[in-house]
Structures are given as C-alpha cells and as structure tokens.
Image: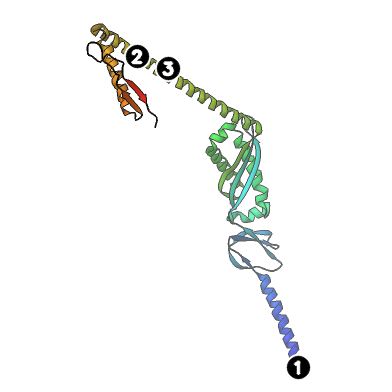
Amino acid sequence: MDKVLSRVSSAAGALAVGAFTVNSCIYNVDGGERAVLFDTLRGGILADVRGEGTHFIIPVVQRPIIIDVRTKPREIPSVTGTKDLQMVNIKLRVLWRPVIEKLPQLYRELGTDFDERVLPSIGNEVLKSVVAQYNAEELLSKRAEVSNRIKSELIKRGAHFHLTLDDVAITHLTFGREFMKAIESKQVASQEAERQQYVVQRAEQERIANVTRAEGEAEAATIITKAMEKTGNAIVEVRRIDAAKEIASKLARGRNITYLPGGGTSADGGNGGSPGLLLGIDK
C-alpha cells in the first residue's frame, strides 16, 4: 500500500513539473496585439514580430513583450500664439497606431509607453509651428486648411517615430477674452452699419415715392386746369355730380338712415319749401 501511494505521489509530482514546464514554454497573443521577444543569449530584442496565436519560448532565456497595435484615440491640448500675437487654446484628436514591422525598434528606443513620450511632444511642436503662420481670424475662416496642414505635418513627424496617424482633427478652438470681446464689438458695429444702410435705403425709397406722388398730383392739376379753360365750370359740376352719386350710394347702403322729404310748395306751384332731412335712427 505504501508503495502504491509513493508511486502515485511521484506521478503527481512529475505531472505538476511537466505542466509547469509546458506552461512556461508557451504564451498567447490575443487579437489586436503583437509580441516581441527579449532573448538574453542573442543580445536583447529579436528582430521578428510574433502575430496572434500561441507561441513557444525558451524559459528563463526568452521573455515575450505584448504590445497593443489597435488604433487608439489621443487628445493633444496646446496653448499657442497666432501670427497677430493672439493666444489660442486648441485641442487635437488623433487616431494613431504603431507600425507593426517596427515594433522591435520602437520598444528598444521608447519602451511600451511610446505614445506618452512621442504624441504630446510632436503634437505641440506641429501646432505651434502651423498656428503661428495664421492670424486669429484666419484660424476661423480657414479651419479646414489649418487642419489639413496640421494633419500632414503630424503624419510626417509620426512616421519618424514609427507611428501611423489615421486621422487628425481640430476638436476645440477658443481665443482669449480680449479677442472675443473685439469680435463681439466688430459684429455689433457691422450690424449697426447694416441697419443704418437699411434706414438710408428706406428713406431714399420714400423720397422717390413722394416725388412720384407730387409729380402725379401736379400733372393731374395741369390736366384739370386745361379742362376748365376749355369747358369752364362744367368739369367742376361733373366732379360735384360724381361726389353726390358716391355719397348717395353710401347712404343707400346704410340701414339706420331715413330720408324725409321737405314739406310745402312755392308760390309758382313748385316744390320750393324746406329741403328734405336725413335722419339717423338707432335700433
């Protein structure tokens, strides 16, 4: 019985040692990651890059370094000056990833936190150099052009450090208080100038309308004068008759107006008595 237990314990120990040895000889690289090997016998970081999957190593002699190669966002803030000496607060959003073929060199020179060491430095450098070539107003009116120049310069600088920049965009752009007040004052002055221009145009239109109206009245008076010279008072009588017709028409449409003819006759038998009356009757 003791021999059996001894054999079982020996087998269990051998199995544990074997499992530990196998586990020490393999490692896994997950999706979106790559691995570089540090070999103590071959002079440090090896030149080849291991892809996704399970790989073998020599325990103690070799050590894998897992590096994430997926595209990641990074925000780079900077406070810099424009060409006309205005201070501007600007932020960039950068989508970046390392160049897979250069991972051994990248790790050898910068370590695993290469993005912390590289991106803020080159981002501020490019922002200051590009923004200094534009006035404050041009940063607003030529924002797309500024963004493209910053993107092209950052891509060049990132390639020097074995980083690929998939996208670069300006996400935040603000100026100092003095410049913002100057912009507001300029906008108010521009609106006031437009309002004054509208007032001037309106006054000009009213002047033209008054002149046209006066010319029409003068022409009408001239026509009436010529007609009176030819026909005497006949045109005045015609106007009087037209006015009487208009008044009679309005009175005829009134519901509360009643006409009472005048009473009595004249000495020659005509109706020379008192004239008729118009009475307004309230209902």
- Tell whether 202 sits left or right of 24: left
In this rendering, the label closer to the viewer, 2 or 3:
2
Name the amino acid type tagged 2: Glu
Most extreme residue toward the left, as rendered?
A: 269
- What residue is pinned by disc 2? 217
User: Any mark on residue 207, and which?
Assistant: 3
- Closer to the camera, 101 or 146? 146
213 vs 131: above or below: above
- What residue is pinned by disc 1? 1
Q: Position of residue 109 (x, y in %)?
A: 67, 52
Q: Position of residue 184 (x, y in %)?
A: 59, 30
Residue at image coords 57%, 35%: 139
Secondary structure under tag 1 reads: loop
Lower position in the chain sequence, tag 1 or tag 2: 1
The answer to whether residue 72 shows anywhere in this view is: yes
- Tell whether 201 sits left or right of 164: left
Which quadrant of the figure has residue 12? bottom right
User: How far, Cα to Cα, is label 2 from label 3?
Assistant: 15 Å
Which quadrant of the figure has residue 189? top right
Lower position in the chain sequence, tag 1 or tag 3: 1
User: How far, Cα to Cα, is label 1 from label 3?
Assistant: 127 Å
Name the amino acid type tagged 3: Arg
Name the amino acid type tagged 1: Met
The answer to whether residue 161 shows anywhere in this view is: no
Secondary structure under tag 2 reads: helix
Q: How many marks?
A: 3
Secondary structure under tag 3 reads: helix
